[in-house]
Image: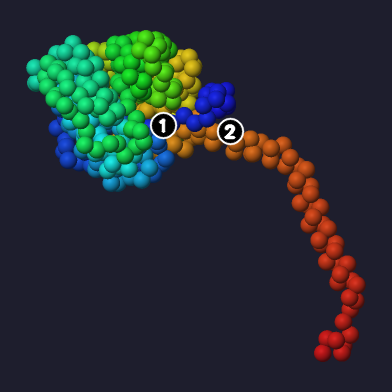
């Protein structure tokens, strides 16, 4: 029941973390169009958030600017919040990152969110002369500058890639006092440390996918709390903690398995052989059935029914040792577009209500009606008998019509 699962938190948010992952060699224009249509679909289904990635190499994750994508998606949607998931802050001038996000906050009327990270693909950072150690160190420097600018400070600073002289924003955010900010975490403690230091949210991208991710969930938030205390800041609310996980849902497990045979091999191959991102543990199987079994048996993801999806969210909740604010399904094209859309529909129809206080009340109402059905059915029959008898009595009281009355 919802009260047991999430305690005092009354509504778990749901959304997507969309890298995206498209098989190379296909029409990229149509792939991007599918991504936009997916966001429209999620908005119509009542999903809360969509986080859009930034990547520049390796052929599958083809959105280079989450800000541009969000601007396009915002014009197609009504209520879903749209976040950069994430801007690789080490690649950019922090002044322009802050400035563009403030503009996006205005364009979306407060639906924009800023997610930052160091950049996950070494093939991206190598093209601008940075290695993974550089990007993590630059993330810390640049996030500090971004947060100061968003607070309205005038900043003079020099990093290894940029120099700022009396830098300041010419617009204040549309959101009051500012839009949400979150830091990505995969395997290293960098993300939780920065989230605690700056009092911002945490995006645990490796919640189920990394070797350390699931077991480290509670530790992630411990680091946030420790860093917040060290810097004398209030601990961010757990509602600002988002976990990213893998799911494909169908009416039956057999159907779900058949669905993902369409494209799951590309997704596995990307992490096994293309993306230099060893933190993502997807096993070594080269057979499609072995890939699916690995995901399910290791608890990394769900290929199954809405009930399987519910159980995975419960497991993550318990493992987090106190709860989190949102569950984001990692966007993928394991199944064809039709089956993918259906999976999202099933999550919205059957999984989300379980964790948003909407399932329990209707189930309870149905149970009350079931328990009292016989008694209420008897009163219905009694009412019919009563009205039938009453009508008969009225007819009898009037008596038979005379010839004159009939004429």
Tell me which residue sits at (89%, 75%) in the image: 398
Residue 289, horizontal then vertical, whole percent: 33, 20
Residue 271, horizontal then vertical, whole percent: 23, 18
Residue 344, horizontal then vertical, whole percent: 39, 36
The answer to whether 21 is drawn above or below residue 277 in the figure is below
The residue carrying pointer 1 sits among few (fewer than 14), some (14 to 19) or many (20 or more) residues within 10 Å by Cα, namely many
Task: Tell me: 279 left or right of 164.
Answer: right
User: Which residue is nearer to you in this view: 120 or 8?
Assistant: 8
The residue carrying pointer 2 sits among few (fewer than 14), some (14 to 19) or many (20 or more) residues within 10 Å by Cα, namely some
What number is the disc on residue 14? 1
User: Which residue is nearer to you in this view: 290 or 282?
Assistant: 282
- Residue 60 lies in what quarter of the image? top left
Please give the residue where the numbered disc 2 appears in the rendered image: 360
Task: Tell me: 131 left or right of 81.
Answer: left
Secondary structure of residue under mark 1:
strand
Q: CA distance from mark 1 to mark 2?
A: 18 Å
Tell me which residue sits at (28%, 18%) in the image: 287
């Amino acid at each position: 029941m919802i009260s047991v699962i999430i305690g005092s938190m009354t509504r778990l948010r749901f959304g997507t973390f969309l890298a995206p992952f498209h098989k190379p060699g296909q029409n990229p224009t149509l792939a991007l169009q599918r991504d936009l249509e997916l966001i429209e679909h999620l908005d119509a289904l009542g999903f809360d958030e969509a986080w859009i990635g930034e990547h520049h190499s390796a052929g599958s994750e083809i959105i280079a600017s989450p800000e541009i994508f969000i601007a396009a998606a915002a014009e197609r949607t009504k209520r879903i919040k749209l976040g950069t998931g994430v801007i690789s802050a080490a690649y950019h001038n922090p002044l322009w990152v802050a400035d563009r996000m403030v503009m996006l906050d205005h364009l979306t009327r407060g639906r924009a969110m800023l997610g930052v990270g160091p950049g996950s693909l070494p093939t991206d950072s190598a093209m601008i002369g940075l290695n993974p150690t550089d990007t993590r160190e630059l993330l810390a420097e640049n996030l500090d500058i971004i947060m100061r600018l968003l607070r309205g400070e005038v900043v003079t600073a020099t990093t290894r890639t940029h120099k700022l002289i009396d830098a300041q924003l010419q617009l204040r955010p549309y959101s009051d006092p500012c839009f949400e900010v979150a830091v990505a975490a995969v395997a290293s403690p960098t993300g939780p440390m920065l989230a605690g230091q700056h009092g911002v949210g945490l995006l645990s991208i490796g919640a189920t996918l990394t070797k350390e991710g699931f077991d480290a969930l509670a530790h992630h938030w411990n680091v946030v709390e420790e860093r917040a205390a060290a810097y004398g800041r209030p601990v961010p609310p757990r509602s600002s903690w988002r976990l990213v996980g893998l799911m494909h849902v169908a009416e039956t497990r057999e159907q779900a398995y058949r669905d993902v045979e369409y494209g799951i091999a590309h997704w596995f191959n990307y992490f096994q052989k293309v993306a230099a991102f060893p933190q993502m543990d997807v096993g070594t199987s080269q057979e499609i059935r072995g890939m699916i079994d690995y995901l399910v048996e290791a608890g990394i993801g769900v290929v199954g029914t809405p009930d399987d999806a519910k159980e995975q969210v419960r497991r993550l909740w318990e493992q987090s040792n106190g709860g989190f604010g949102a569950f984001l399904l990692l966007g993928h094209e394991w199944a064809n577009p039709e089956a993918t859309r259906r999976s999202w529909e099933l999550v919205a129809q059957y999984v989300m209500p379980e964790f948003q206080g909407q399932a329990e009340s209707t189930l309870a109402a149905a149970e009350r009606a079931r328990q009292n059905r016989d008694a209420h059915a008897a009163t219905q029959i009694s009412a019919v008998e009563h009205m039938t008898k009453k009508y008969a009595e009225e007819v009898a009281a009037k008596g038979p019509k005379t010839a004159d009355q009939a004429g």
